[in-house]
Image (cartoon, rainbow, N blue to C red):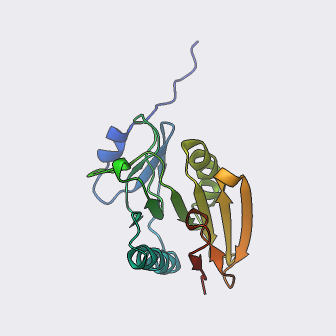
Amino acid sequence: MALAQKKLYTTDDIYALPDGTRAELIDGEMYMMAPPGRKHQRLLSFLHLEIGNYIRNKNGNCEVYPAPFAVFLNADDKTYVEPDISVICDPSKLDDRGCNGAPDWVIEIVSPGSKRMDYFIKLFKYQTAGVKEYWIVDPDKNRVMVYLYEKDEINVYDFADEIPVGIYDGDLKIKME
């Protein structure tokens, strides 16, 4: 007797979902996403504005996108994610569908239902895809974990700390409170 085959999903399955249904796809496995709460959205808005203002004031070439924004991490149709914040500094990765390849900086804001995804599955996926910097913002713990993959460095900050942004060599510092 043969073992049952697990269905591998593709980006076509993501785009076939009913309007308003949010999901991510990692290595062919689909993960449904719950709507974010108010605290999550407040942090998302704050970070988007801080980063966007910094880029504009410095006449930077990077672009910042809040979720929902499609990121196709791999050169296949088996991985599709919507990071809470994506910063892309290589314009050749951008097209009308989203980002093709790894953003330079990704921020995920932890929600009750996303802990496993943010702390484990995406942590590994972003590292192997070539993301340079990954922040896990945990509002329940008032903590930000910063992974600087190119330096093989992990730093932990409280919301009250000034957090230096690695892709900007610390020129940008963000205080969450």
Residue at 63%, 73% (x, y): give it.
164
**Where does residue 163 sit, x and y in percent of width and height?**
65, 76
User: Where 104 falls versus 27 (above or below)?
Assistant: below
**Where does residue 75 sit, x and y in percent of width and height?**
43, 35
User: Where 115 falls versus 59 (above or below)?
Assistant: above
165 lies left or right of 15: right
* Quarter of the figure that contains the C terminus: bottom right
140 lies left or right of 102: right
Residue at 51%, 56% (x, y): give it.
104
User: Where 169 falls versus 125 (above or below)?
Assistant: below
172 lies left or right of 10: right
**Where does residue 72 sit, x and y in percent of width and height?**
41, 45
- In the foreground, 85 or 167: 167
Residue at 62%, 71% (x, y): give it.
170
Instruction: Tell me the quarter of the picture where residue 82 sits.
Output: bottom left
How many numbered circles does the render carry? 0
- In the foreground, 15 or 106: 106
* Quarter of the figure that contains the N terminus: top right
- In the foreground, 68 or 155: 155
The answer, for residue 66, to whether it is visible in the render is: no
- In the foreground, 31 or 99: 99
User: Where 54 falls versus 76 (above or below)?
Assistant: below
Residue at 26%, 52% (x, y): give it.
96
Residue furthest top as drawn: 1
**Where does residue 129 sit, x and y in percent of width and height?**
54, 43
The answer, for residue 71, to whether it is visible in the render is: yes
Instruction: Tell me the quarter of the picture where residue 58 sits.
Output: bottom left
